Image (cartoon, rainbow, N blue to C red):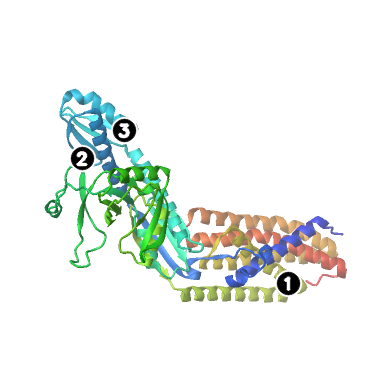
Amino acid sequence: MIQIQRWKIIVVTLLCVWGLLYAVPSFLPRTVVEQFPRWLRADRINLGLDLQGGSHLLLEVDTRAVKVDRLQNMVDDVRVAFRNQRVNYTDLGVEGDAVSVRLRDPADRERAVTTLRGIDSNATVTVSAEGVARYTYSERLWEDRYSAAIQQSLEIVRRRIDETGTREPTIVRHGKDRILVQLPGVDDPERIKRLLGTTAKMTFHLVDSRASLADIEANRAPAGSIIVEYDRPDPVTGRRDRLAILRRVAVSGENLTDAQPSFNNGEPVVAFRFDAVGARKFGEITTENVNRLFAILLDNRVISAPSIREPILGGSGIITGGFTVQSANELALLLRAGALPAPLKVLEERTVGPDLGSDSIRAGSIAIVIGYALIAILMVVGYGLFGIFANITLILNIAFTIAIMAALGATLTLPGLAGMVLGLAMAVDANVLIYERIREEERQGRSPFPAVDISFQRAYVTILDSNLTTLIAAMFLYAFGSGPVRGFAVTLGIGIACSMLTAVTVTRMMIVGWLKWARPKQLPI
């Protein structure tokens, strides 16, 4: 007599109930699922871009800008350090991949080298016989900076996308310096491109009052200053006005802790708040420079240049600049998410309409239904009552696959639907192996109970071997594939793993239960 321990029956039954309950929400609209009691709610399976519709963007991080920005900062660091150490120099600037400076007095050589190494111990310092010092990083350190910039860009892109409320976005590093962004259900890809295409590097600078209008028109800036444009053209002349500002950053946008859209005198503005360090710097600057213009730059363009009327000691303020409600919202979002360390370039853009996604779901669902129906008919015709048992386990297999994918947060794609259909075929193949073994044992004259017991024991090794080889193939597809290939591998792998439970354990429990209840003299197979 075949005996199945009671605890095994209870565990398998509870697993089957969990699989069915956890799979049901994926077949219902989200609004319906949200009406369920909290204890009954379950995660819905995520639909990929090809099933739900949305936007696909492939972005490239401009690593060259990382180098240029760092070299410019190094120039400022060298200028300040040499001034403090009273090192005489000339021709300070960027030359190739390094900062170059000529020492006027050979006697300053040792002091200059010590000063440069004190700025950044990781940098390399060389001085030629002519007294020209070169200050730069090794290739390995530049690569480390690029990698850090790409990782930082990935996190900032994720924060910006999350701020928009997009559900289940896919944001992953793709290759050496690219970021793949897939946004299911997004119907305004241009807004997303604007958000991702803006570096959002905000800085605060004092306006240089030494520069005359003629100097600005001739693009001549006093020493230590630069000429910058406004971000919007003048509504009367249609030209972008320009302004001379001190090169030194008074306060950096990195010190911002919050930014929210607001209104001031009925006009949309952006209210911001600094952290403790930024608030201290902001208070000192506004205290020491009352009645001076204070320029606010976004990506090296002036968005506002108000006059400091009184010291601002609270660490908060507002940004004006002729915003609309939408542009104020977008700027606040960008400032909250943080500035990108380098610009992003859109290399590839695809948009999948929701109608096409619905058609894909419909076609995939029809394929699964037809595949299941054909398998169900063949199993019933070929194995009778035992074929019905196999069909029940197939339904459980689909439920388990969907439930596990929903629980893991996996994304179902169109190739994933194909993997699910193949998983059905693999699951029923295990039942066929068992049933054919039962027939063989029965032909050898065994009674029903021993025939079933021996068949499950001997077929199990074959089933395990065939499923493991396919599972290993699915693992390699996932490890070395990308995009659609991974979607196929995920559903196939989960389906195969589930078939080990449904085809062997659940089918065995149903057959043994029927044998104990009916006690047949001959098996209906």
Mark 3 and mark 2: Cα distance apart in space: 16 Å
The residue type indicated by label 3 comes to Ile
Q: Pointer 2: residues within 10 angstroms few (<14), some, or many (20+)?
A: some
Dot 3 and dot 1 residues touching (CB under 8 Å): no
Please tell me whether mark 2 sits on a helix, a strand or a loop: strand
The residue type indicated by label 2 comes to Gly
Q: Pointer 3: residues within 10 angstroms few (<14), some, or many (20+)?
A: few
Give the residue number, with chain letter if any, for mark 1: 387
Residue 59 shows in this picture: yes
Mark 2 and mark 1: Cα distance apart in space: 81 Å
Camera-side mark, 2 or 1 = 2
Residue 159 drawn at (x, y percent): 45, 55
Please tell me whether mark 1 sits on a helix, a strand or a loop: helix
Residue 421 drawn at (x, y percent): 59, 68
Dot 2 and dot 1 residues touching (CB under 8 Å): no
Label tally: 3
Camera-side mark, 3 or 1 = 3
Residue 437 shows in this picture: no
Give the residue number, with chain letter if any, for mark 2: 93
The residue type indicated by label 1 comes to Gly
